[in-house]
Image (tube, grey):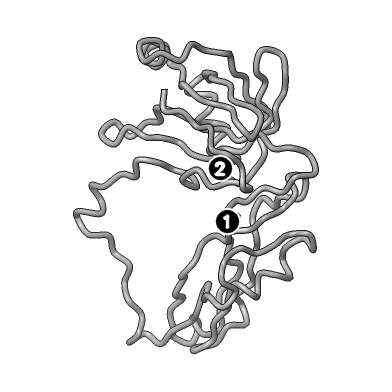
Amino acid sequence: MKLEATVRATDTASASALRQQGRLPAIVYNRGLNISVSVDERSFDRVFRSQGTSNLIDLEVDGKVHEVLVKAVQMNKRARVAVHVDFYAVTAGQKVSLHVPIEFIGTPVGVKDGGQLDVQRREVHISILPRLIPHSLQLDVTALTIGDSLHVSDLRALLPDEAEILDDVELAVVAVVPPRLAVEDEPSAEDEDAEPAVIGEDGEGADEDDGASED
């Protein structure tokens, strides 16, 4: 998916003016690149909803296209809108680290028997070549009975051979538990009011230097 950007000034006043014009200050970076840019707020929202943080975006900066991943989105907690974006420019042939979402497919046998599905992880951290990044991993949970579980190691078969799993492979991903052991995951009033300051991977990359800017 394509997104257009323009080079911008880096002073605070310019960043504030851009936001008033409906544009988001952003940065495009990797080991050898550091460009301050801006993108249209609505266009970014549309692209980000589609691509998230685990899919490549063709970011055109003044006529030159960079393949990028969204590494972080800084949010205004009160207004709940994006105020700054970090794009990491990938390099062909060089692995990147990212979190890929997990989609759970089917209704477990154990749920039909009265158990409850206990989802413990909704993404997996991997290192992979940019051209092989999966949009998501579809994990079939249909055969799970009460007491069964799947672990990070079970995701190996869903990934390209070249991918490296960075999470502990013994960690549980999903399980079917008896009703008396199921814990309702209801957010508290405090949790409902809280808003993350940053969406993304907190600057994690493929051992790259973090050139991100907050301007």
Residue at 40% in and 30% down: 82
How far across and down, in percent of the image, does residue 102 sit?
A: 58, 61
How far across and down, in percent of the image, does residue 15 sit?
A: 40, 15
> Few, some or many C-alpha atoms within 10 Å of disc 1 (few <14, some 14-19, many ≥20)?
some
Residue at 46% in and 15% down: 10
Q: Is residue 43 left or right of residue 22?
A: right
Q: Is residue 48 above or below residue 128?
A: above
Q: Quadrant of residue 160?
A: bottom right
Q: Quadrant of the N terminus?
A: top right
Q: Is residue 136 left or right of residue 14?
A: right
Instruction: Check if mark 2's residue and mark 1's residue have beta carbons within 8 Å.
Output: yes
Residue under label 1, please give it.
101
Residue at 72% in and 49% down: 95
Q: Tag 2: residue type?
A: Gly
Q: Tag 1: residue type?
A: Pro
Q: Is residue 164 above or below residue 75?
A: below
